[in-house]
Image (cartoon, grey):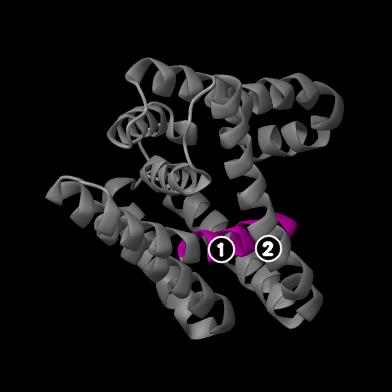
Amino acid sequence: ATVIADRGLDTFPFILLAIITIVSMILYFDLPFIWVISLIVAVILIIVIFILALYVSVDDGAGEKFANWILNTLKFFYKRGYEKWSLRIKNAIMEFQDSMRVMLKEKRVFIYGIPLSFLLWLLEILRVYFIFYAFGANITIIVIAEVFIVATLIGMIPLLPGGLGAIEGAMIILYSTAGISPSISAAVTVVERLISFWMTSILGVACLPYFGAPVVKKLSEKL
């Protein structure tokens, strides 16, 4: 429930920021037409998925239909072990519905969670700003926010974990388009990703044997 609440509350501010960012970038950035269309489509997809998740969470019938659709799709590709997969998916959707209902009923989650989510996004943008400042680059926090949101949006494309490669490339290109030299753009991007992705990943892996043993055990039992 905690993980689902975290992702849900994190998605709402991101959608709002993404819409504002895309409108701003269309107006002030000289982006290729295909980029503009891709960004608009990406935001629409995120909104649709978010609304669908909320709908499935409060409507038992919708949840059952969604589960059946997933199961029928999987059955077409993976006939072996179908019963095992079907049970897991049904249980996962039921747990998702229960968690979302708890979150929607608990008003304190929204009262404290949404402002904190906006604050966390702001802190991430400020982190990038201070990295630029450390390199002596002159760039406004508005441009950083726009690039950061768009790069995060691009990184949501499920190609590699953590948007690896896609985010870095998008950030370098967009910062360069905004007038920052390619060398500074690349250096800032490398430092930013070292902090935001690699450092947290390494720390997580290092802590897993000490704090994640029960989780690892449960996963191994399921597999």
Left or right: where does residue 125 sit relative to residue 77? Answer: right
The image quadrant that residue 68 belongs to is bottom left
Q: Report the disc number at residue 31.
A: none
> Is residue 4 highlighted in magenta?
yes
Q: Nearer the viewer, residue 199 or 122?
A: 122
Image quadrant where one finds the N terminus = bottom right
In the rendered image, residue 92, in percent from the top left (x then y), is placed at 59, 60
On the question of residue 98 being in view, the answer is yes
Left or right: where does residue 61 sit relative to residue 207? Answer: left
What residue is shown at x 47% (from left), y 25% (from top)? 189
Amino acid type shown at disc 1: Pro
Q: Are marks 1 and 2 in contact (CB under 8 Å)?
A: no
From the image, give the main secondary structure of the stretch colored magenta. Answer: helix
Q: Which residue is mark 2?
A: 5
> Is residue 62 highlighted in magenta?
no
Q: In front: mark 1 or mark 2?
A: 1
How far is the residue under mark 1 from the one under mark 2?
A: 13 Å
